[in-house]
Image (tube, coloured by chain):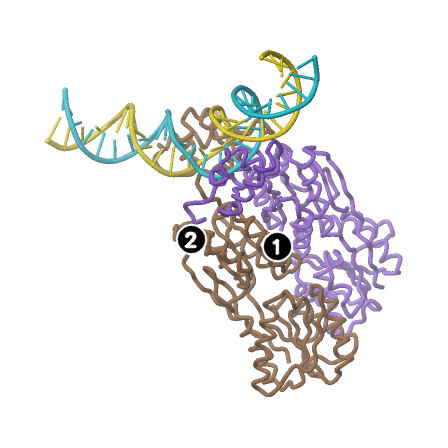
Chain colours: A brown, B purple, C cyan, D yellow
Amino acid sequence: MDEKNRVTLADVAATASVSKMTASRALRGAGDVSKSNVEKVLQAAKDIGYVGNHLASSLSGKRSDLIGVVVPSLANIVFAEVLAGIAEGMEGSGMQPVFGVSDYDTDKEYLAVRNMLSWSPAGLIVTGLDQDETTRRLLENAGVPVVQIMDMDGTPVDACVGLSHYAAGGAMAEALVAAGRKRFGYIGCNMNRDTRANKRLEGFMRVLSTKGLEIAAIEICDGPSTTKSGRDLTARLLADSPDLDCIYYSNDDLAAGGAFHCIAAGISVPDRVALAGFNGLDIVESLPVSISTSRTPRREIGKTAAEYIVRAKKTNAGREKRMHEYTPSLEVGI
Amino acid sequence: MDEKNRVTLADVAATASVSKMTASRALRGAGDVSKSNVEKVLQAAKDIGYVGNHLASSLSGKRSDLIGVVVPSLANIVFAEVLAGIAEGMEGSGMQPVFGVSDYDTDKEYLAVRNMLSWSPAGLIVTGLDQDETTRRLLENAGVPVVQIMDMDGTPVDACVGLSHYAAGGAMAEALVAAGRKRFGYIGCNMNRDTRANKRLEGFMRVLSTKGLEIAAIEICDGPSTTKSGRDLTARLLADSPDLDCIYYSNDDLAAGGAFHCIAAGISVPDRVALAGFNGLDIVESLPVSISTSRTPRREIGKTAAEYIVRAKKTNAGREKRMHEYTPSLEVGI
DNA sequence: TTCGGTATCGGTACCGGTATCGATACCAGT
DNA sequence: ACTGGTATCGATACCGGTACCGATACCGAA
């Protein structure tokens, strides 16, 4: 099976003394092959260690078993879990995911999608609804099922699995106000690129304003959101505005960092100040202080998206423009 | 560019009124094409929106631009970061990663590797050195560069990028003993499958025994290691053995959970009990209490591994059996 | 015996590129 | 004018499968 002398279907056919076609059919479990020949072929394949060549079958069959996935980042457990869900949703389907990373950059996203397309994938999964115009055109003309995930605030190209971040932000505001919080701060990272975080903030502020409230202080940083920056930004925010009784973070990583600052500084959470994040990361539930979060079904989103494509491929249904909206469950720790 | 009527190289050639070969060469930047023709072809390609077909070129060229990656889990930030490193190491090389998940299961790993191979990848990156015998044979005969990552305790098939977990466990024991700790506990998850965690434990115990010490209490759980189980297991361990002055965890997730338990229970860390994990996750440095860890260069490992394959492909060098050992930096919080 | 139908097979033509090698044109040198 | 060399091009043969369709064999029915 060395570099040069790959075992091919022709070899299998030869050792089973049938034609390539019969061998091909037998191996794929397609019909029109006698039982005895199926056995012979299977045995031959096992004997000489036949592995098959996806490139060839995909090229020939006009469509591969690849699913192209484009996410903004891999160094973020949220997307990693989405990927895990995708892998789970494809299990047993014989399909494989190929990944591309956009780095929250629309140009890179375009390139990634384009690249995926050149593999003739069975489907595409991309993050969010806010693609560049050219990228969107690419997706529209792709001719295969496309699932946009995570977000539902906007118009999808084809199918869409996710949640409304705008609504999630609003719901959190509702809950916090209902719990009697009045003086709000906000902490976020990467705001110029993370459109979903912005949508949450928008929804959050919108609800506040209907209650005659507002965000009194904001702390933003450019880099990626980490626990460390959450801790640092919280320290800064509370130093400047010590009278805040609630801080909304763009996600749980930052919120956890905020919790750490408060623990270290002896600030009682949530009595003195309530903290609220987003995602419902595993870590939140074991934190020594109680903070609020919206639990997002990341794994399920990935799984549902993958299943959509697997099903579309199996039934040859093409695009069905399904929408699958999840509602994040609010976990209020106040 | 719809499903049926894909734009092919022949179309480009036709609109540029040259042969397919000339178009192919022009597009790839290969030599033997006049400047004027290169321009004509490039223009034609842009005009009709040619995208190219990786399947076809890979099949024809006997080798694809795919890199197969097999990791045990995606729902673990450590491997997600490795993936991010791999993506980084391949940037600009025109190569793409395809992922497979083994779920810490050797059978699934075999299937995943086999599956990767059927894409004629330019190289393979697999996690760890402890593959099944059949999987190992597959890797040996793959005929492409193979990089085994994360681990260095064993004999690699080809190249190897990682660290010695045995040594890392030992180093941590040395440090903790040097700091005066005497009564050790251990907490781990998924022990029957996570061979690297076992190697760390082995190295840890080995050093302890040379000092006349031992692990006095152990708490193990079957599931995946999460902060939550870390917290629960720590509570149980300390309830049973309240006199421990140090707990070694199989990783930082568990250790962070331990820290949370101690904070909540009012147990002073590290004065009363020191906690030590593994990986050097971001969260550790912003924790409100100080714990120890070994910082592993996950991103770098992924990047180095990917670069090995990219280089091997570029220089056509084949296997070079390089070893790249990283030494995790000990961060002792005592 | 002949005939139509079903079950099984195999030949051939692709899929969309690339490697190879021969063909062609054009140039300087003699 | 003739020769050899270089630059540029294209026809052809694959790569390893699968779709399509025609061929073959064997069966019961007429």
Q: Which quadrant of the view contains residue B220?
A: bottom right
Residue A95 can be seen in this image: no
Relative to B216, residue A222 above or below? below
Q: Position of residue A273 (x, y in %)?
A: 70, 81
**Which quarter of the figure is the C terminus of chain B placed in?**
bottom right
Instruction: Identify the amino acid type marked 1.
Output: Lys
Residue at position x 78%, y 72% in the image: B267
Quickly name the residue at label 2. Answer: A312
Instruction: Identify the amino acid type marked 2.
Output: Ala
User: Which of the two discs, 1 and 2, sits closer to the camera?
Assistant: 1
In this picture, residue B331 sits left or right of residue A65: right
Relative to A160, residue B89 above or below? above
In this picture, residue B216 sits left or right of residue A289: right
Which chain's residue wears label 1?
Answer: A
Dots 1, 2 in contact, CB < 8 A = no
Relative to B319, residue B325 above or below? below
Q: Earlier in the sequence, mark 1 or mark 2?
A: 1
Quickly name the residue at label 1. Answer: A108
Judge by depth and name the residue closer to the eye, C4 or B249.
C4
Q: Position of residue D1 (x, y in %)?
A: 58, 12
Residue B271 can be seen in this image: yes
Judge by depth and name the residue closer to the eye, A166 or A88.
A166
Q: Crowdedness of circle 2 by 10 Å Cα count: few (<14), some, many (20+)?
A: some
